[in-house]
Amino acid sequence: MATYTGARTIDGVRVLVDETPLDPRTDLKAYTNRGFEWTYEGVEPSQLALALLAHHLNDDAKALSLCDAFMRQIIANLDNDWELTSAEIDSAVAKIDGGLTS
């Protein structure tokens, strides 16, 4: 089970997966080249949502399809410093995916 963390530091924002920097996955879709952000809706939070989902799901197509809803429902509501476990992402994805298919 992976643990994803985000923090605001004196050097800017830092997002890690199990203590390793999270790949922004701009190869999949580049919402922005300005890095990650959270606590609001926008392109930087979208890049974070995509990166988290792509890493966690290991399914680029599904990550792209869930990205917008995940950004609005989860990423935009994170605190300045946060932690998400694989189980929490699975739960959020199940709720979002269920709403998209109903």
Image (spheres, rainbow, N blue to C red):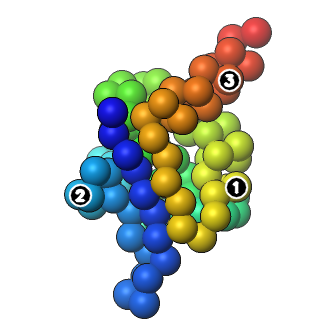
Q: Is residue 43 above or below residue 62?
A: below
Which element type, helix, strand or loop, lies under badge 3?
A: helix
Which residue appears at 46% of the width and 63% of the height? 6
Which element type, helix, strand or loop, lies under badge 1?
A: helix
**Contact check, label 3 and label 2, Cβ < 8 Å:** no
Which residue appears at 49% of the width and 54% of the height? 83
Marks 3 and 2, the one that precedes in the sequence: 2
Identify residue for label 2: 20
Residue 25: horizontal and vertical position, in percent? 33, 49
Which residue appears at 66% of the width and 26% of the height? 96
Residue 18: horizontal and vertical position, in percent? 28, 51
Identify residue for label 3: 95
Quadrant of residue 35 within the rendered picture: bottom left
Residue 85 vs residue 25: left or right?
right
**Kind of residue indicated by mark 1:** Asn
Quadrant of residue 34 within the rendered picture: bottom left
Q: Is residue 31 above or below residue 2?
A: below
Density class for disc 1 (Cα within 10 Å; few <14, some 14-19, many ≥20) is: few
